[in-house]
Amino acid sequence: MTKELVLGVHLLVRDEEELLPHCLRSIVMIADEIIIIDTGSTDKTVEIAKAFGAKVIATEWQDDFAQARNVGLQHATTKWVFYIDADEEVLTGEAEIRHFLEKTTADRCMVHVTNRVGERPEEKIEHGLIRIFRTDKGFRFQGRIHEQLLSDQEMISEIPVSPLRLNHDGYLPSLMKRKEKVNRNMHILTQCLQDSPTDPFILYNLAVTHCQRGEYQQAVDKCAESFRNIDFQAPYRPTLLRDWAKILLKLGQSNQVVHLLQNEVQHYRNYADLHVLLAQALEEQGFLLGAFASYEQASGCKAEAGNSYVCEAGMNSYRPYTAMGRLAQQKGELQVARHLFEHALKLHPRYEPALISWADYLQETGASDSEIAEQLMGLVQPEQPEDTCMTIHALLHIGAFSTALFILDEHMLHTPKYTNLQLICLIQTGQLSVSVALIKKMIAAFPEENRQTLLIDWALCSWSEQRILPYTFYEAMEVEQKIMIRSIENWVLEEKGVQQTTDNKATIDFIQIIMERAVEYRLLRLAKRLSEWNSCLLIPYAKALYQEGHILLSADILLDLLEQQQLDAEGHLYLGEILYLKGFYAQASTMFEGVISLASDNWKARMGAAASYLHLAREVAFDTITAHPEAEIVRQDLQKLEASLKAMGGISWQMKQQGRRRRNIRAE
């Protein structure tokens, strides 16, 4: 008696010799039949396929995925077809799938797919896809790209989730680049658009492809065009909203994200990604209470098996808990923050943003660097160098460079991948000669595109120790670069007869880059000297100081620039923040009004002015009550002012005091 062929596995391939063996090994136990449609491989793909017992069908590639997949369906002899790609593999469910298919009455079944988009455990996107279907129901593929499964027969509405779970590596940046999938997709989608210029599905996939090419504004335009044409019931509509919002955030257009998602999240209450994206947009605009509420909504979303939503890992758990902890800490609610961070780390002890936030919290609450490092290492429980580096990154965030360097030395993390972390720690701890020796080794080992930053660091270390750069520094440099750097060096080392080019924009731009780098490394004497090259460098110098937490040094320069009427809007804002923090509310309000006169749409300045006026009004009310205790109306006004100031605590308009910046502020 002939054995019934239950499940056939179909693949569409071309030059997949590297990935195909992993895929076929994962399905060989469940497949009664393996059909491989080859569209012109020139490597060992066909040979590998046949070694696994696959039936290989050669077909000419016609820029049409549906056409090629349908060729395979013509050769199917099984009751069910499961289609998979070479960059995918079955993780679990092999033992249960046959029993599941024998019992189900459905025509189609979903498979849970995990798409890896990076190397970290949380860098993955999960969703359910229809990948298994009966062969006697007239199913066919349609669409040149991102093909859809269709049938002209009436279907049973139930689409259950099968036991199979897939891992997909095709979205890893290394694979995307190597296989040139993005350019191939753009070519096919452009052809499709010529045939159907208003098709929302094609427009959406064009947006995704533009995004993958780094063409973010074109991606936004295609998302908007797709959204105008899309049907509300379209299954990919929530994913379009998600991707559109992510691109807008990348472009810094958080106000557009709020406008887009505030109503849409009501339609997709269990889609955690949309709630998190809305929260991120609200947070960027300073609305802490609204952001907290949206993160909280995300944390309450339930993860359902076979969820058709495209979901980033942790969007309903450790990601929003970490964000809520950060916001609670920002509002001064430290016990709430502690609870939320602990919960996030319990769910994912190696989630780096949670580790960084936990280190920041511990620093604010008075823990020593060694205590923080000990707690972090206890959470991470490092098994390999990459795990230890999570602790290093958290320590660098809070400026604990000596402790980070000790851990790097203790664990002998001196391979090229980790020497950059070592270099940062060495420079930050003042070990400049050792840093130069390390830089020389790194230049020989690192790719050429990384050398510009290393050369800047070399120059900073040498000039800080009043050393002239050696001939080897200039190797492979063009003549113009050599002249520019030697000119800067002469100026920095105060050689006699220096003739700096004060109006050369290229030189000034380069000096600004190395000056800001010097401030970041706390090489402040050198940074000050670089800022003296040209008066136009004073504003970026003062801003860099303020951003790194050197508040008093920054304030002196900003006040001088104000007196000379050379201060721009951002400089006014920074000076206003400094005055506000010192309690000089009248002077602060003047600064914020100055910002508004220069940039009327600056919401931070408007919030600063409002807060300053509330404090001034509060002072007047308090003085009045002190002089006239019987003034009940004024007492009521004071209570209202106190309530307004408390409410403004839920809006973040000042630069955050955290991590390295907090350390520098305290040191100053």
Image (cartoon, rainbow, N blue to C red):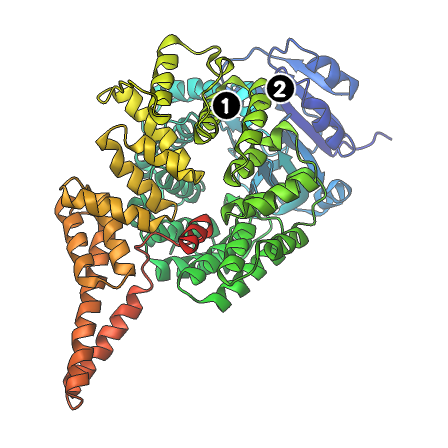
Question: What's the CA distance linking mark 2 and mark 1?
Answer: 36 Å
Q: Amino acid at mark 2?
A: Val
- Asked which secondary structure carries label 2, the reply is strand
Give the amino acid at mark 1: Asn
Q: Quick check: 173 left or right of 193? A: right
Which residue is found at the position 27% from the left and 28% from the top?
533
Q: From the viewer's perspective, is 587 left or right of 478?
A: left
Pointer 1 local density, CA inside 10 Å: few below 14, some 14–19, many at least 20 = few
Q: Residue at x 72, y 45 (%)?
A: 100
Q: 136 or 400, which lies in front?
A: 400
Give yes or no for contact between labels 2 and 1 (Cβ–Cβ under 8 Å): no
Can residue 461 be seen here? The reply is yes
Question: Is 5 drawn above or below residue 375 in the view shown?
Answer: above
Q: Which residue is mark 2?
A: 13
Viewed as shown, does residue 604 lie left or right of 620? Answer: right
Q: Which is nearer the N-term, disc 2 or disc 1?
A: 2
Say what secondary structure mark 1 lies in: helix
Between 332 and 224, the residue placed more toward the observer is 332
Q: Quadrant of the N terminus?
A: top right
The picture places residue 142, in percent across and down from the top left corner, at: 49, 27
Q: In the figure, 180 relative to 284: above or below?
A: above
The residue at the point 54 percent across, 52 percent down is 354
x and y, in percent, of residue 96 in the image: 75, 45
Q: Which residue is mark 1?
A: 450
Residue 394: where, in percent of width, then height?
55, 47
Residue 301 appears in the figure = no
Which is in the foreground here, disc 2 or disc 1? 1
Within-10-Å neighbours for mark 2: few <14, some 14–19, many 20+: many
**Residue 281 x/y as whole percent:** 36, 49
